Amino acid sequence: MTKTEYQVVGTRPVRHDGADKVTGRALYGADFQMAGLLHGAILRSPHAHARIVRIDTAKALAYPGVKAVVTAADFPPAPDKLVDFGEGATPLAYVRGNVLASGKVLYRGHAVAGVAATSAHIAEEAAQLIEVEYEPLPCVLTAPEAMQPDAPILHDGLRTAELGEKAQGRSNISEHFRHILGDSKKGFAETDVVIEREFSTATVHQGYIEPHNATALWNNDGRVHIWCSTQGSFVVRDATACVLDIAQSRIRVTPMEIGGGFGGKIPVYLEPVAALLSRKTGRPVKILMTRKDVFEGTGPTPGSYIRVKIGATSDGKLVAAEAYLAYEAGAYPGAMVGPGGMCVFAAYDIPNVTIDGFDVVVNKPSTAAYRAPGATNAAFATETVIDELAEQLGIDPVEIRLRNAAKEGTRRADGPKFKRIGCVEVLEAVRGSEHYQSPLEGPNRGRGVAVGFWFNVGLPSSCTINVNADGTVNLVEGSTDIGGTRTSVAMQAAEVLGIPVEDVHPSVVDTDSVGFTAVTGGSRVTFSTGMAACEAAGDVIRQMKERAAKLWETVPDKVEAGRGSFRCNGHSATFKELAAKVGETGGPVVGRATVNPRGVGGSFSAAIADVEVDPETGKTTVLRFTSIQDAGKAIHPSYVEGQMQGGSVQGIGWGLNEEYYMSRDGMMMNSSLLDYRMPTSLDLPMIETIIVEVPNPGHPFGVRGVGEANIVPPPAALANAIYRAAGVRMRRLPMSPPAVMEAIWSK
Amino acid sequence: MQSKVHVRTAINGEPAEFLCEPRQSLLECLRDLCNLTGTKEGCNDGNCGACTVEMDGRIVTSCLVLGVEAEGAQIGTVEGLARGTELHPLQKAFLENAALQCGICTPGFLVAAKALLEQEPEPSEARIRLWLANNLCRCTGYDKIIRAVQQAAREMKEARP
């Protein structure tokens, strides 16, 4: 099929869940109501690091209206084992420990106990009546400090996985990995210019507007039903089963509508606690987080310390590069430094590379994924150094990137060879854009560019399509819809079936009602669940051919199908006409598919930022911003643009304002949306978009997935723009007014 | 436990009554007592705008208003925007412009934008950005929201006699 032949793919229909979402009818997790519902609250640690000496729940239990209190002591005994919910293997003790602290608290905001009561107010008051005696311990808040030999130790049992071997002795370094390509030492000897710089980035939060929530009912038949807002209903099922040591099949998770996630709504926090409280009370229990709980008790993205060294010849050929990435995992290992190592130099063809990555635990909330997790930190460093190299060599910053851009066949230092990718096409789109070509005039103004990469993932998805007698179909999927994927998935089914997208009714259903489907994350839903929908639609077509063959007394192979009609020997019928006859030709038609696609296509994205820096205050104003991204194929261009705009603005917030502002004793000083300053409409211009389409051969329509790569380049593009506007190289995030002022003063 | 207060108010043009504790916010009363869950809680301290409702012609963050303050007031929520099956021009424009992704902030934006267009039928982009600066959206980067408000303003102008 060529581009012009598509009927549905590439159009911009109104989303299927649109009416519900503009009328207030859509039910999110917090909207769930049920007879007999109890309300829960969580008691959280006031210390960043302390031993729990004693917990006394008597006063809380005696408070009128309180029905139950739970602590880690209520977890059933279970031998420790490794569990994997799609983001790498983790000891069960760590997963449980983050749900309810046992023995020690490892960050301020760490959950210690849960209360269920007849109202949320009573539960909150009762939580404060739980007496916890702590023995405070010294805390450590950054990776470089936590890596010191005399640093306070978070986990007595943690041993560094040092280049694959378990090291001796206690440490806060969970893992040290190294990727080697060529010989970087030799490579640097062949260069004319070498630039090495140090960077640090602050902890930032995904900042979804909907706080976490969970309702659980431990039913009298022993089955547990959970309603919550999650990126992965099957992850909630499997993680809760592990934490509670019960069979997966005893848990049913109904995903409610979800108010943003960006990676932060993959882990379980409240679900196991609500389930334990329900088991104790025999009633459904609903727990909602406050905004402060969200900041202090859920996973932000890692702060990091990074060194990057890149060497080039005088004609701008990159020859050697080294990176040192130390990422803060927070309280438990898993800082997403692995992806940082995969992405740090991914945009370039550099023959000699060494990358060292360190996963370091610190006394801050256990980190979670955040949109291309790990890549933004790394790209901030690399893309700033590339910009400096371009300046020193007198080469245009886009030109130096194009001369060295990764392409099909380029080997990444972490192993894989790129298949067909669109790095060159994205950079050419930057160079050819009206934005990049237009002059930027005026004092204190500057333009910066940067490029970024995210590899995207496949993972399993399931889909069924039920044909209705009126010629419409009901599509059943397991991917929670966080930003319009019901429609991007339904559009692909409609294209294959040859029917209008309005005739496909997509539903996201509970874990009892659809085959296993991995998380809404990794930019995978339109790619992977879309592929499942294509295959399920293909299965419908196959069965419809059989029905046509029966009607026309021929064999299915002789029936031709396309564009929603079926033909054979002068007979023809539309999809609708044939659907009306499924009853008389053999009964209902149900198409099914499960996929675990291998043909994942990574996505490159670039950003052009024009800024003005106020030399009196250090405030950076974004004057103009363009996001460029290779979508492979944009199924619904409006929602592709939306991903690019949203990711760009999160990147702008990360670059200019956002940070966990920590006191020395580990308290987040700005845990409200007033003080944790995310971009508002007033802070921004329109965000221009250029969609590049280099089809991914691993998907029927060429989809790559667009959710993530767009957040990667903005902080670096802004840093490069600030340099041209104010003459200062910013190597610390955020580049907030005080940080820029400090840099201007020390010029 | 404190005794409850009987509050007589009007929601979306209809008389309404509820029994609330004096400490309950209007947001809680709308959501938990009146089953109007279209109004969302994002922060419960007046900073995100997800709970924006109209109260006697002004927009307020309902998490910062007590339920008892609704006595005798006229309250407008997202559930009151559509007329029967006919969506408000803002609701249509949000859908046509893909101005929502997760949708949790959408009710607050719609209520706030409606109040703006009632006061100022032809606001500039800068004016829309200033007016909506109290409503946080983390998904869209605001671009498509601003365009949707601009489109609704144009359509409402054309529809006027």
Image (tube, coloured by chain):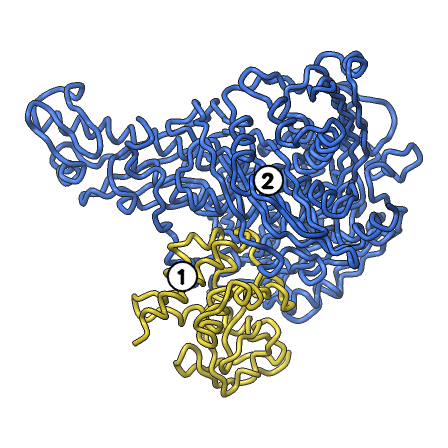
Chain colours: A blue, B yellow
Which circle marks residue A167 in the picture? none
Q: Using residue A150 as the reference point, say whether residue A634 is left or right of it.
A: left
Could you say which is closer to the camera, residue B66 or residue A341? A341
Number of callouts:
2
The residue type indicated by label 2 comes to: Ala
Residue for badge 2: A607
The residue type indicated by label 1 comes to: Gln
Say what secondary structure mark 1 lies in: helix
Q: What residue appears at the point 76 percent right and 61 percent down from the top-left corner?
A: A130
Q: Locate residue A595: give its quadrant.
A: top left
Could you say which is closer to the camera, residue A570 or residue A508? A570
Q: Is residue A558 above or below residue A305?
A: above
Q: Using residue A685 as the reference point, say whether residue A747 is left or right of it.
A: right
Looking at the picture, how far across and down is residue A603, in whole percent? 53, 31
**Residue A381 at least partly seen:** yes
Which circle marks residue B151 in the picture? 1
